[in-house]
Image (cartoon, rainbow, N blue to C red):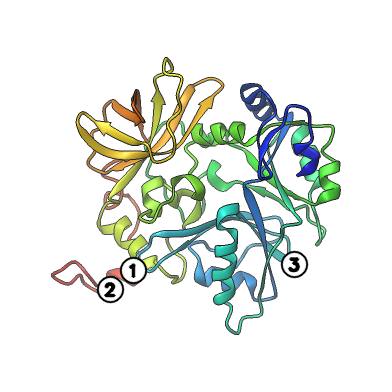
Amino acid sequence: MTAFADRPGAVSDAGVVSHFGDPMREQRGLVAGTAVAPLGDRAVIEVAGEDRRGWLDSITSQAVASLIPGDSTELLILDPQGRVEHAAGVFEDGASTWLITDAADAEALAAWLSRMVFRSRVTVTVRPDLTAVGFFAGGEAEQAGSASAISPAGVPVVWADPWQRVQPGGHQYSVVAEHPADDYTWRVALVDAAGLQGLAAIDAAGTLAAEALRVVAWRPRWAGEVDERSLPHESDWIRSAVHLSKGCYRGQETVAKVHNLGHPPRRLVALHLDGSVDILPERGAPVFAGDSEVGHITTAARHYEDGPIALAILSRRAPEGDLVVHAGETRIAAAQQVIVPSDAGATANVPRLTRLSRRPLASDGSR
């Protein structure tokens, strides 16, 4: 990370470069494919061993057993009640399966995975020697990022974010003619110290720029949209991180029950904030409909075209009209755009999972 943190104008904290002097210009550079973003707030876990893919398949929400070298996907680890505990991008190079996760979650995720190894031929290793570098496809940044990526098995380790499209086995709750992720061709290369030097000639963008582009694409993230109550349905994460017809895993029954028989209790929305207020609300800032608190901000950012924007998690029954965000003593008007509809779940036009439908519901709603 030093190669980036030492650049003129870099503003960083604990190894995370937030910007290089102009976050708006940096967003434009990312979108144009001329800039890369060092992601100091991400971490890398290497999963090796001949059983790794089948083992990961058995304990996570995603079908990874059949991944081939060069494949990218995403997985969640859920608790027995189907709540999100961990999340990671996944890249398979033929020798190892690489997990890209939020730095604050890396040690806990690696520890949980290690406890689940048992007799499987698998090793789990946090790789602090590697840096995640993000960029968009289709420009010189992608060429430089791919050339600088590690390739221990002969395949450059460059993760393609699956959020751009609904993945096999997934389902999208959002009902829009054009999803804002259609152009979200986000890539993340894993680079070592030598690789960082190879990116010295490329323009750089900070995490403020990367986050603004994530928010405008409605892309959920563990460090932003996940709390102790989060179900994957609430943020439309089934779209890219859950395979609805794969084999059993912890939390699967809740995923299927909510999707086929009920509704997620909360829903993710996009907010367009009043630009005349020169304050961005912090994560956790309460959101009100009239006098009623209906949710909270998960991530807020300033976008180079849309201005101040945010993602927020609301009660399923929150009205779909305009809202107000309480940022300390400041009140910020917010126009709401529905991401996950209030009727998401049981109305989904997909076959129900037969494994769960064979057993009838008890009178108290349990199986």
Q: Secondary structure at mark 2?
A: loop
**In the image, is residue 200 above or below residue 104?**
above
Nearer-the-camera pick, 72 or 59: 59
Q: Position of residue 236 (x, y in %)?
A: 41, 46
Q: Quadrant of residue 154?
A: bottom right
Q: Position of residue 214 (x, y in %)?
A: 54, 37
Q: Amino acid at mark 1?
A: Thr
Please tell me which residue is depicted at 81% across the width and 44% down the height of the picture.
196
Left or right: 203 in relation to 74: right
Q: Secondary structure at mark 3?
A: loop
Q: Residues within 10 Å of mark 1 (few under 14, many from 20)?
A: few
Q: Which residue is mark 3?
A: 95
**In the image, is residue 335 above or below residue 259?**
above
Q: Secondary structure at mark 1?
A: helix
Q: Earlier in the sequence, mark 1 or mark 3?
A: 3
Q: Which residue is mark 2?
A: 358
Please tell me which residue is depicted at 22% across the width and 41% down the height of the picture.
317
Q: Amino acid at mark 2?
A: Arg
Q: Position of residue 71 (x, y in %)?
A: 66, 55
Q: Which residue is mark 1?
A: 354
Q: Residue furthest bottom?
A: 119
Q: Position of residue 231 (x, y in %)?
A: 37, 55
Q: Quadrant of the N terminus?
A: top right
Q: CA distance from mark 3 to mark 2?
A: 39 Å
